[in-house]
Image: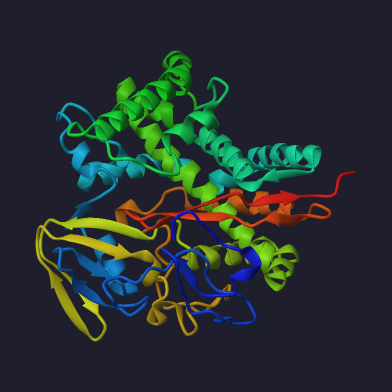
Amino acid sequence: MSGQDVGGEGVSGGRVSDGDVRGGGVGGEGLSGGRVSGEDVSGQGVGSGGVVRGDDGVWHVCGHAAGRAVLRSADTVQAGLGVETVEKLPPSIRRPVLYRDGAEHREYRRQTAKFFTPRRVDEHYRGLMVEIAERQLDVLRRDGEAELSTLSFRLAIDVAAAVIGLTESRPGIDARLERFFPEKFGRPGFTSLAGLRWFLRQNVQFLGIYLKDVRPAIRPRRRARRDDLISHLLDEGCRDGEILGEVITFAAAGMVTTREFINLAAWHLFTDQDLRQRYHHSPEPARHAILHELLRLEPVVGNLKRRATAPITVPDGERTETIPAGAVIDVAVHATNLDPAAVGPDPCAVRPSRPLAQGVAPAALSFGDGAHRCPGAYVAIQESDIFLTRLFALPGLRMTSPPRVTMKPDISAYELRGLRIAVDRP
């Protein structure tokens, strides 16, 4: 489904991807199921547990146990997400953390883990999240209406900026990031005018973010370190260009994806009154369980790709399958998250705190797994809950226009735009 309007009240269950609607009426406890993801992979169907080799040579993984095994394997490295371009960089240039593997990656994650622990988030960022959320809701109170994606993006930017250290940005960081992560991407290259245009466009955007966001943050931290990611990167000896690469990586992970999940969760709450009331009247742990369940059903990134560096044996139902060295593996997260063996019966139902198989995370594989599991998972859930709790407490809050849903087919990622909300003015 690309650019298609989806009426919030008109989707009562099932999943929507590229115009395909399945499983309508799957309700579990009277709550509707997923809305925007869940594409079939190689005809296996969601949650089938299949591990199959496609005609293009790519191995497609749909079962949770197999997907987790691939993501945890030490015999895989990143594939997709532009890794082919990064691999062409000179060895002297340090790769962003997203594109590193092995001992170097593990050491980096060990050193930076302190920025994302639940205790640190609660102690250092909870008050800031409340302040930022209220600042965005003040805009809604003042104007009486707003587009939710604008409010959620500003929230996600300010929270991630505090963790990263982008605290001296020039005005307009949200517009710069919007231009860098547009709704529709072209393919940069040198073999066509369109490719050349996109290459130049992205480099101009890189330069803008560097000059107006990254460099202003680096300068004061060279003089005096602070307790943030950019200061850590300076301690590691990173050059400005390498810090820019890390900032872009964290911007995509901590700003863009959180924005989309907040929009998605709000859409569910607006269109399911039982779920809305349950969320509104629940304590924080139960609210987090609801958000994890929605994220399980609607992973912001629906596919994760790896390349095998050695043969990998993964479970496939009651048997095993060996994926050869050199193969590209596509873990269909939207399918693995619906595997009944992992998440129990009625996998398409919204059922917070559902009984899960041993070792299965509440959001299943939506935050990834293994060495590249999202380090900011707790940050994302915490800021989403702080914002949504306060948003849905506003008098007269209502959705006046449902979102337009577009898909990024390379990673099965969704974008929700045009969801407009209104409140009663004082």
Q: Is residue 208 above or below residue 293?
A: above
Q: Is residue 213 above or below residue 116?
A: above
Could you tell me which quadrant the C terminus lies in? Answer: top right
Q: Is residue 379 visible?
A: no
Who's the residue at 67% across and 53% down the image? 388
Residue 171 placement: quadrant: top right
Residue 367: x %, y % from top left: 42, 57
Residue 145: x %, y % from top left: 75, 44
Asked whether, in this view, residue 227 is left or right of residue 359, the answer is: right
* Residue closest to the far front: 193
Residue 275 placement: quadrant: bottom right
Who's the residue at 39% across and 64% down the image? 365
Residue 422: x %, y % from top left: 76, 49
Who's the residue at 37% across and 42% down the image? 185
Q: Is residue 18 above or below residue 259?
A: below
Q: Nearer the viewer, residue 415 or 362?
A: 415
Q: Is residue 265 visible?
A: yes
Could you tell me which quadrant the N terminus lies in? Answer: bottom left
Residue 348: x %, y % from top left: 49, 77
Q: Nearer the viewer, residue 122 or 381?
A: 381
* Figure label count: 0
Asked whether, in this view, residue 234 is left or right of residue 298, the answer is: left
